[in-house]
Structure formats: C-alpha cells, structure tokens
Image: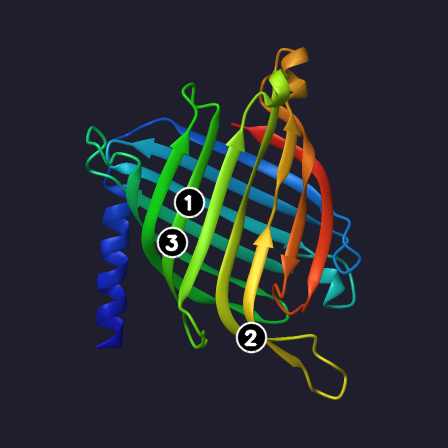
Amino acid sequence: MKANKLTAIAILLAALFFATPKAKAQVNAQVLYDFGSDREFVTLTLEMFKQDKWGNTYFFVDHDFNYDQHVEGPNLAPGGSYFEIARCLNFWQNSAIKNLSLQVEYNGGITKSYPINNAWLVGVDYFIHSKDFKNTLNLKALYKNIQEKDSDVPMQLTAVWAMNDLFGVKGLKFDGFADFWWETHAVDFREDGTCDTKKTVFITEPQLWYNVGQHFGCDNLSLGGEVELSNNFGSTGGFKCRPCLGVKWDF
C-alpha cells in the first residue's frame, strides 16, 4: 500500500512539473567558495527557472565538495548533495488574482554525516513586481511535512527577491531568498554524546553578482558571491555568518 501511494504521488508530481507547454528556461551554474570557519570548501550549484502558461517550475541542486573533511584522504566525491524542486500552478494568469499561485515543492538531500530528510510542501505564492519586471518579490506560505521529524507548527515562510541593474548599474544583480520554518532538531553535538534541541530554523542567502562578461562580448559570465546568514540551521545552533565568493555562468 505504501509503495502504491508513493507511486501515485510520483506520477502526480511528474504531471504537474513536466506536462506543460514548452518555454525558454533560465539556467545557471554557480561555483562558490565558502569562507565560513566551519566550512572552507567549494559548492557547485545548478539552478533552473522556467515559466509557462500553467505557472512556473524552479529547481536547484547543491554539491558540496567536502568529502575529505569527513574521510581521511583525497577529495574523491561530493560530501553532500541537496535538491529542491518547486512548481507554482497558475491557470488564471489573465484574471484579477493572476499574481497568486498554488505551490507544491519537494526538498531532500544527503551528507556524509547525516541525511536531510524528505520534505513535502504545499501552499500559496504571491508575486510582486515593478512595472518593468526588473525588481521582483515572491512571498510564500507553505505547509511543510518533514518525514520522521516533529515540528510545533508544520509551516514554512519564504521570501524570494531579485533586483536587476541595481542602482542603475547595468549587469549588477542583487537576489536571494529567506526561509523560516519550525522543526525540532538536534544541534551542537558534544563529545560525550549530548546535544541541544532547537524548535525553529532560519536561513537567508543574499547574493550580489556583476556581469563582467558584457565587457568582453560574453553576457554569460558573472562574478560575485553570497552571504549565508542562519540561525539553528543544520546541526549548528545559534547564529552563523558564512561569506562566499565565486563565479556564475548563465546558459
């Protein structure tokens, strides 16, 4: 019975994510070095956003090249991978509520030390934009179910923004996201096996990119970075600030 339910869910998600009219996708790859004192490794991110007549699809995959920090020896493979995919459904794009969409989402991943449990989210997304669409903001309220995890409130609140040609500078982009959700989880493990327990998680990753390629006839290349600001994220309790620098290639 459980297998049948999972199969039905997979078929439904496949229909929602992929059975849509074709449209041009925005795809990029980012290579960032994390200078955080507890990180100091490279992350490769593959990101895609695609809009269509039924709404839009977004996903990203992170690969952390930190295997050698967990196992003695050469860095032979990613030490962790994380995946998110979200589908906004909007069949009323010509109506008065065109900026409001329904959203379904899946999150999950694995690290050398611990799994990032499957999470299923469903809720609403509200889209705000400037007249020229250079500046955008998405606000989301989502029911969140994390497998084998408890939470006082099974919800996630998310904001996603993008500002193009910031301060009138062509090619300067400021974007990012902020997530807050409830999850009872262990942090700050100690040598004696004890740890602390936290109830909420916050993370935001504002990014700043400058399109240097425009000066060399190649608009694909940008330089910049991000700052991860988090509280009780992963297995680390309290506030953390982790700056990153890197390159981005838009396909």
Q: Is residue 97 left or right of residue 149?
A: left
Instruction: Report the Cα–Cα distance between label 3 and label 2.
Output: 21 Å
Instruction: Report the Cα–Cα distance between label 1 and label 2.
Output: 25 Å
Callout 1: helix, strand or loop?
strand
Q: Quadrant of residue 218?
A: top right
Could you say where residue 92 lies in the image, as x and y percent from the top left? Answer: 19, 35
**Above or below: residue 41 compared with residue 188:** above
Residue 141 shows which numbered tag? 3
Could you say where residue 63 lies in the image, as x and y percent from the top left? Answer: 60, 51
Q: Is residue 185 left or right of residue 9?
A: right
Callout 2: helix, strand or loop?
strand
Could you say where residue 222 lies in the image, as x and y percent from the top left? Answer: 64, 26
Q: Judge the density around disc 2: few (<14), some (14-19), many (≥20) Cα neighbours within 10 Å.
A: many
Label whose residue precedes the other's in the sequence (3 or 2): 3
Q: Judge the density around disc 1: few (<14), some (14-19), many (≥20) Cα neighbours within 10 Å.
A: some
Residue marked by disc 1: 139
What colouring style does the render use? rainbow
Residue that appears at 65% across and 40% down: 31
Residue sitting nearer the eye, 219 or 126: 126
Q: Judge the density around disc 3: few (<14), some (14-19), many (≥20) Cα neighbours within 10 Å.
A: some
Q: Nearer the viewer, mark 3 or mark 2?
A: 3
Label whose residue precedes the other's in the sequence (1 or 2): 1
Residue that appears at 41% across and 63% down: 155
Residue that appears at 73% across and 46% down: 243
